[in-house]
Image (cartoon, grey):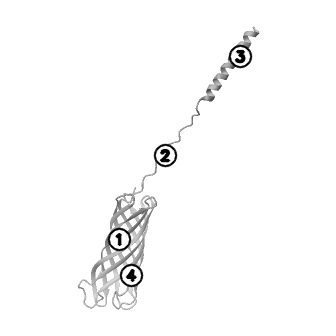
Amino acid sequence: MHIKTSLSALAVAAALSVGAAHAADLPYRKDAPAFAPPPPVFSWTGAYVGLNVGGGFKADNSFGRAGDVSGVVGGGQIGYNYQISPLFVVGLETDFQGTSLRSNVGSTSLPWFGTVRGRAGFALLDSKLFVYGTGGFAYGELNTRFGSDTRTGWTAGGGVEYAFLPNWSAKVEYLYTDLTNNGGFAFGPQRAKFHTVRAGVNYHFNLF
């Protein structure tokens, strides 16, 4: 009886040893990490609308004998961008500005002006920073002691715009604007040339 009991115990012990050795030889299984999809690629494509405010001052040899011409500029803009590649963005923007640009000598002033411009540039920093040049058509009203008329001309400049939220961006922009006489009042200044620097925000309807 003791012999049978000992043999049975030895057999059980041997079986347990073989099972443990086999289990030790099995490869270690680790749960696969959860799949996290990459964030969507940022794009400037879509329509937008926004507001801006800044300042302006006259360029040299313009506004006739008006002296220094300077003041506050503010208004709104609307436009559309199209990102043609991860690096390149093009667009079209129109804006309308009210101004307090007025001379410190006489009665020359520029109550308002507007532009219609193309924009083109580079998308940097994961496509969230848009560095661009801009230029196109400009128009505005010039008042002097000789009268008032609406002038047309051109504008050019550049800026930077940063998308700080999925549908919001902030920008800083410089423009040089040249409005010609257009055959208006004969004795007024022949050209109204001025610089503007503006900061603004845009809401993008289709930004993703």
Q: CA distance from mark 1 to mark 2?
A: 39 Å
**Label 1 or label 4, whichever comes before in sequence order:** 4
Count of number-bearing discs: 4
Residue 14 point in image, percent of width and height = 68, 19
Name the front one of labels 1 and 4. Answer: 1
**Label 2 or label 4, whichever comes before in sequence order:** 2
Q: Quadrant of the C terminus?
A: bottom left
On the image, numbered disc 4 is attached to which residue? Answer: 100
Q: Is residue 46 left or right of residue 18?
A: left
On the image, numbered disc 3 is attached to which residue? Answer: 10
On the image, numbered disc 2 is attached to which residue? Answer: 36
**Disc 3 marks which amino acid?**
Leu
Name the front one of labels 3 and 2. Answer: 3
Q: Badge 1: few (under 14), some or many (20 or more) residues near its Cα, within 10 Å? A: many
Seen in the picture, residue 58 relative to 202 is either above or below; the reply is below
Q: CA distance from mark 1 to mark 4?
A: 24 Å
Tag 3 and tag 1, C-beta contact below 8 Å: no
Q: CA distance from mark 3 to mark 1?
A: 91 Å
Residue 8 point in image, percent of width and height = 70, 13
Residue 50 point in image, percent of width and height = 38, 67
Q: Badge 4: few (under 14), some or many (20 or more) residues near its Cα, within 10 Å? A: some
Label 1 secondary element? strand
On the image, numbered disc 1 is attached to which residue? Answer: 134
**Disc 2 marks which amino acid?**
Ala
Label 2 secondary element? loop
Label 3 secondary element? helix
